[in-house]
Image (tube, rainbow, N blue to C red):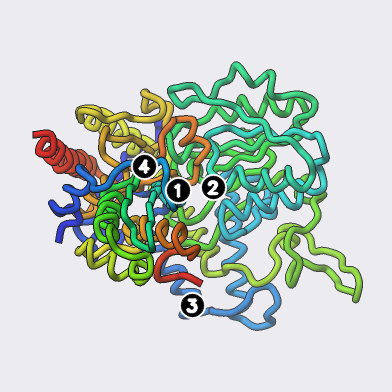
Amino acid sequence: MNVYQEELLDHYENPSNYGTLPRCTISHEEDNPVCGDQIRLDLIVEDDIITKVRFSGHGCTISIAAASMLTEEIKGKSLTEVKKLSRDNILDMIGIPLGPVRIKCALLALKVLKAGAYGIKGWPGEEK
Amino acid sequence: MDTSQFRPLDVERIREDFPIFATTPPLAFLDNAASTQTPRPVVEAMDAYYDTYRSNIHRGIYRISEEATAQYETAREKVAQLINAPRARQIIFTRNTTESINLVAYSWGSANIQEGDEIVLTVMEHHSNLVPWQLLAQRTGAVLRFMEITDEGLLDFTQLQDLLTEKTKLVAIGHVSNVLGTINPIQSVITAAHAVGAKVVVDAAQSVPHFQVDVQQLDCDFLAFSGHKMCGPTGIGVLYGKLELLEEMPPFLGGGSMIRSVERDVSSYAELPAKFEAGTPSIAEAIGLGHAADYITHANLAALQVHEQELLKYAHNRLQEIEGITLYGPSSPHQKAGVISFNIEGVHPHDVAGVLDTHGIAIRAGHHCAQPLMKRLDVIATVRASFYLYNTIEEVDRLYEGLCRTQKLMIRNQRRSVG
């Protein structure tokens, strides 16, 4: 299985919902201290529904592709529903086996979402 | 270098000593600046301890404990010989370079550094030779000052005269940069530091494994390195210090072994080196390190250096053929040890490492525990390949081919997205 599947490379090259939202409800940014990758998520939430989402930052194929897929996944859904998204959901989206270091790349965007929207600290799957 | 005794490395023969190359093909291990592989004689020496004379050292009144003590102290002598330390008791066993530097920062630092004193470092230091001094400065009110580097990754010597003043109490400098591979002219730095009365700590983690380091010739005050970067096991490191400094210094960690006598409220301390080796040490690992010192000495450090230079020169030429590559550090391999750091335009270092891994090539991508240097180079991370005595030209070719494939993968993708 190749880490660099076409679908991931497509997301990396042409990420969905890339950019920022100047007047957003929630804006949060975090980095991965291991590699310096940085992801920011901007959300506009109306009546608990995520009506707009943008992400920005820099990172490797996995972290950018995961952020891109995450924005597609959460757009139009309710914050309540999105709160259930887990580490395994993201790894399923990525769809290829990842080692422990690369798993953090995949989970960075979800970590940003959890911290920004729900105040949940820590890596998804390892929260206190 | 003593050319009369020079014989080139027999790399084929050397590779046979490292079971990992047979058990884990097609591994091209190019992350030696992080940690090296372990040859059979080192593992066998540690096995022999566990299988035939496993016991604690120094206190046992029975044969196998005496044997363990003798082997542990023999290892100390071998390490002393490796760096030409005058006496074995100037060799303190620690866990690693980081612990050695922390020992100096806590023990010597607390006794000698006061508010307003200055500690001079370089921007290319590994965090292990930076954070302990930040902590010391925070405890004491001392000030950290930094030697900058040129765009080529060499120390900027024009600053040295301004940096070194009567306020300078300590200079802490890496012998070889773990990112750029730059061999720093520490002899000149030591002479200049001593001229203003400052002491010098050398982080030799990337030099002792790769070429002959002579602490008496350098006249450094302290020198630190790790076993695991020189064919030894993890969990064992070395601090060398000048005798009069080590003798004056207060203990670092308190506990068993480091005492002479203990009352309820006060203790007196053991002589060197026990004063700085509280608790049961890493006995097997120290014995392993002694054999690692034998191993690289027997391979011949001068030949090892020549071999790494050849690999480095070849890698420099080969990698420069790649369009969009930026090499960091000195352009002349002669100013470098076997480390080559680079980035390929448009490709994240982690992706380079990820694709190379699928081809069995182990390299490092990241900030290499040198974040201030990353900032100076204006990069978030780099890709780093680093060599040791068992690496081959063929592995450098595989690195080159892997990088070309990585680039093709990404560029094909870029072309498609544009079209």
How far, Cα to Cα, is label 1 from label 4?
Answer: 58 Å
Q: Is residue B252 above or below residue B144?
A: below
Foreground label between 3 and 4: 4
Residue holding disc 4: A20
How far, Cα to Cα, is label 2 from label 4?
Answer: 58 Å
Residue at 27% x, 53% y: name it. Answer: A62
Q: Amino acid at mark 3?
A: Tyr
What is the count of numbered marks? 4
Q: Amino acid at mark 1?
A: Thr
Residue at 20% x, 42% y: name it. Answer: A13
Left or right: residue B214 compared with residue B151? right
Residue holding disc 3: B50
Residue at 38% x, 52% y: name it. Answer: A43
Q: Is residue B185 above or below residue A83?
A: above
Q: Is residue B317 above or below residue A48?
A: above
Quarter-wise, where is residue B2 in the image?
top left
Q: Tell me which numbered mark, 1 or 3, is placed earlier along the sequence.
A: 3
